[in-house]
Image (cartoon, rainbow, N blue to C red):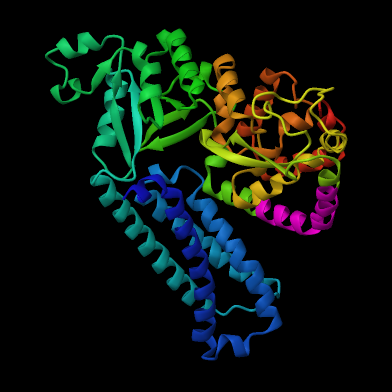
Amino acid sequence: MGFLKKNSNILLAVYVTIDFLVLIGSFIIAFYLETRSNFFYSISTRLIFSGIIIIPSLFFMLQKFEFSSKYRIKSLIDVLRNIIAFEFITITFFYVFTLFGFYTFSNDFVLSFFIMTYSFFVTERIILKLFLSFMRSRGYNYKIYLIIGAGPLGLKLYNLVKESNEFGIKILGFLDDYAERFISNPDYPESIKSLIIGTTDKLEDMLKLKKIDNVIIALPMLVEDKIIKITNICEKYGIKAELIPDYYKITSKTPSVRMIKGFPLIGIRNVPLENLFNRLLKRLLDISVSLLALILLTPFFIIIMIAIKATSKGPVFFKQKRTGFMQKEFKIFKFRTMYVNAEADTTQASKNDPRKTLVGDFLRKTNIDELPQLINILIGDMSLVGPRPHMIKQTEEFYQIYDKYLVRHWVKPGLTGWAQVNGWRGDSDIGMRVKYDIDYIENWTFFLDIKIILLTIVSNKVRKHAY
């Protein structure tokens, strides 16, 4: 059961894979029901071409409908409504293909495909929702929320979540500076009094000691300074804060908005890569580019490895613990550019660093030393584009100095990033790097990744501060 609680994204990945297989299977069976002949013996070049375009297109459309917002808080009605919309687009898709003469899909084919996909997707989603609801009623697969504010707004959200296991949210409790007033009030719900933990002064200690996934701020806008302080504390510890509106003055330029039974929650920051479809798209780019690059660069890697071995003692690769996605540690791969030394994990390289080898100096200035991180990308620790990962010691130091620093870890670290292509890398201003990293996180698009990759190759800025 711990697996289910910690790996709901794996469950959704399996679910997405099944969707793709259903689309392929329905396409083959619909052809058989129409022609009564074996698909693999009767298949034509036009049908193959049509299938190669139609199946992936329908798959991506389906996932876009499904995961355009947080799946955890989507109601079953919303999910089924999306399936109906998807099926109407599917029917249109087949008839457009027929209209333009790519391949003639008969009414029987389209009807069979519609019935099979609609029946399976609806059944699959009902079963998944019922299964998750059942498991959540037993205390598994839930997110832990802390509510700041025990007044009417906080109570309303609590009651909405408490009434349903569908959302997988568990309220740890409330923090409120008028806690004693609520507890001593005879008209205040007795069932809630035990959940009032204390005042907002306890927030920082709770974020340190408790496993909290989200903080919901349900305070009046009159206490704007307090709200700003609370959000800064949350982001200091890398915890997401969400506001019950109307708190527009302290949100970012692209706040996220989501609904629970018509009740709006406004996130301080919009993170497009929380969308499963966007993550899938980015991951496909990472795998395809890193795998191709590793294959093509193998002869080049061998030459570099020989040069490193021939000019200095020590391993070819330098492996070091770095802070990754959601502050999880991982080992990063680089070509070794320094003589083996005791300060490798604590001191960043400088312009005239005596620890650098002759070959290593060249590798660092040309950024070639970073290329083994294609391995990290292929195995999923990193992405092609994202905030650059720092040494563990640096993370511990920087998050104490820069309030928003840990927000960088809401996405996977990258081989290159928005800060790097704008000249902020190496021992440059960390505050500026954080600013650009957060800008990237809030404004991510697939095409922004492509732009950053191209700029990494052609721009001189990316070599600025390359020591």
Residue positioned 60% across, 78% down in the render: 105
Can residue 125 be seen by looking at this rendering? Answer: yes
Residue positioned 55% across, 16% down in the render: 400
Q: Is residue 361 above or below residue 182?
A: below
Q: Is residue 135 above or below residue 404?
A: below
**Residue interval drawn in magenta:** 285-306
Q: Is residue 462 magenta?
A: no
Tell me where residue 363 sits by quadrant. Answer: top right
Q: Foreground residue, 430 or 455? A: 430
Q: Is residue 121 left or right of residue 108?
A: left
Q: Quadrant of the C terminus?
A: top right
Q: Where does residue 260 sit, x and y in percent of width and height?
A: 36, 37
What secondary structure prevails in the magenta region? helix
Q: Is residue 65 above or below residue 177?
A: below
Q: Is residue 304 magenta?
A: yes
Q: Foreground residue, 64 or 333? A: 333
Residue positioned 60% across, 86% down in the render: 40
Residue positioned 65% across, 70% down in the render: 52
